[in-house]
Image: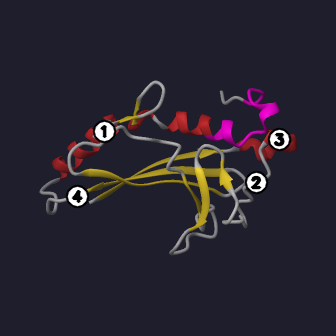
Amino acid sequence: MLTSIQYPFADTRSFITDDGGRLSRPRWIAPDTESDFVRSFGGVTVRPRGGASIGGEQYHCEARWAVRFEPPGLGPNRRCAFRRFYADGRALAKFEIGIARDGSGPLAATREIDAILEQLAAVPAHETPARPLGELGPVLARAYLHVSTAHDLIGTCEPG
């Protein structure tokens, strides 16, 4: 079983003067997958099976450095399958974490699925301080704002 946890957010800097200090790289519309990366997140790659042309899903950042888990943080028979960041370069962005459940067969009932989702929402991500996955959305949005803004402008466009 694979559970995908998504944290969508809007990057409204494209609506203000000079893109609010947003860095010009990566160019999400057509990134250079050999050299483009998101600071402190990871490198930008082509999505192997393609993606929606609207919404920036044909490229993604392998964001293994943005969220880390302390072993055995995900619990028994679970592993982090991926950590990806998608952006369209204008306003849409999302962070996605995939948690794979290894081993046992199909789940028996909805309540078992609900219990697994509740457990996953409580898993602490290795941040300072550690935060449960269910509360990580605003942290990731702030982290992206920080790593994608020119150093001399960091702090001038903090989220509300």
Task: Locate the C terminus by quadrant.
Answer: top right
Tell me the element at label 1: loop
Tell me the element at label 4: loop
29 relative position to 126: left or right: right
Residue that numbered label 3 is attached to: 16
Q: Is residue 109 above or below residue 29?
A: above
Q: Is residue 87 above or below residue 141?
A: below
State which tag comes first along the sequence, 2 or 1.
2
State which tag comes first along the sequence, 4 or 1.
1
Task: Locate the N terminus by quadrant.
Answer: bottom left
In the picture as drawn, the residue positioned furthest to the right comes out as 17
> On residue 106, which mark appears?
none
Residue that numbered label 1 is attached to: 73
Q: Residue, x 32% and y 34% (percent of image)?
A: 122
Do callouts 1 and 3 mark residues in contact (Cβ within 8 Å)? no
- Cα–Cα span, label 4 and label 1: 15 Å
Residue 64: x %, y % from top left: 49, 49
- Cα–Cα span, label 3 and label 4: 46 Å
State the residue in front, 114 or 122. Answer: 122
In the picture as drawn, the residue positioned furthest to the bottom comes out as 49
What residue type is disc 1 on? Answer: Gly
Report the mark closest to the observer, 3 or 2: 2
What residue type is disc 3 on? Answer: Ile
State the residue in front, 139 or 79. Answer: 79
Q: How many marks?
A: 4
Residue 147 on the magenta span: yes
